[in-house]
Image (spheres, helix red, strand yellow):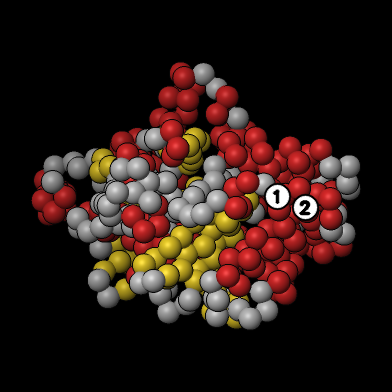
Amino acid sequence: MIILGLMSGTSLDGVDMALCDIDRNGYAILAAETVPYPEEWRHRLSTLENATALEYAQAHVDLGHYFGRLARQFLSTVDARVDAIASHGHTIFHQPDRGLTTQIGDGDAIAAETGLPVVSNFRTLDVALGGQGAPLVPIGDELLFGHYDACLNLGGIANISYREAGKRIAYDISPCNMALNRIAARMGMDYDRDGAVARGGHVDETLLHALDSLGYYAAQPPKSLGKEWFVGQFWPLVEAAPLKEADLMATVAWHVAGQIADVLCRQHIGSLLVTGGGAFNRHLVDCIGRRASATTVTVPDENIVNYKEALIFALLGYLRLTRQENTLASVTGARCNSVGGTVSGLFGNEFNDLGNSVL
């Protein structure tokens, strides 16, 4: 089945699109592209949690149409018969302790723009079943990258998955690019290329201790992070520190590496696959290696680094359309495994074969 995976992460870098050929024997990424968000959307998404209900509802629909137009344009450049689209959406609220998680980017709008079936809302069923609704990528780690002891994604949030006692365990470790990119923005940069700013700064022990002492890090999995926690608990400590940006960058990078290394050492991880935008931050990856010296750290080819999450959401869409479990209770803490995702846009005769497998 050929599925276009769409991913929009918390760091607001852009929309990742990966056209993937998925079957029971494996996968191939046929084509991939990242489209940076225009400033209008970056601002709109970064402030949406404080908008009115009407503004929120309008953004949900508008973002769906935007995703759909991007997908349509991208697919016009490839020579492939596409079966469906799997869209993560963009997370605005994530509060599983209150039974809610919301990812905007209306699946029906994407379907209307592309004429293709769309799977979206992957997280909500798991949250309704008492789970964290996150992370979802670990089932892909299990099925596609299980030959590594652990898989680490350095995106807006750093998250990890590994096997423990025969089960796949996964959770969010700490903020990552969400914090580093915000410091970079104060310096007029989109991000700290290669970690050069952090490498030139000094670690401040006072701020480091304050960050390391946040209660989330002592909590046991399953657990997950949202922007609300970052804005309410993490960022105020960074913002209040009387430090130069380079020293803030160095301290936050060392903090992130330390939280990751704590997990690697505690779980005796021998081989680690690192993906996500932070995998290009050489200083951060070096810090992880220094703080977890017994772990062999592998950064794969750029296609996997950049598009692993989009690839795995394509896999989640494939599993949803073929009625196979795509969410693991051992990861999220839900009452049971589930087949998550809402299917939109089955358009009649041209999709009869696919529709019969779904409905």
**Observer able to see residue 42:** no
Q: Nearer the viewer, residue 283 or 131?
A: 131
Q: CA distance from mark 2 to mark 1?
A: 6 Å
x then y, percent, for residue 330? 36, 59
Which residue lies under the disc numbered 2? 209
Q: Is residue 232 left or right of residue 326?
A: right
What residue is rendered at 54% in x and 42% in y? 226
Residue at image location 68% in from the left, 43% down from the top: 234
| Image: 318 above or below 270 | above
Residue 49 is situated, as x and y percent measured from the top left of the image, at 55, 29
**Mark 2, secondary structure of its residue:** helix
- For the point 84% across and 42% down, the residue is 241
> What amino acid is labelled 2 in the image?
His
C-beta proximity under 8 Å, tags 2 and 1: yes
**Can you identify the residue that label 1 sits on?**
213
Instruction: Decide if residue 257 is in sight here.
Output: yes
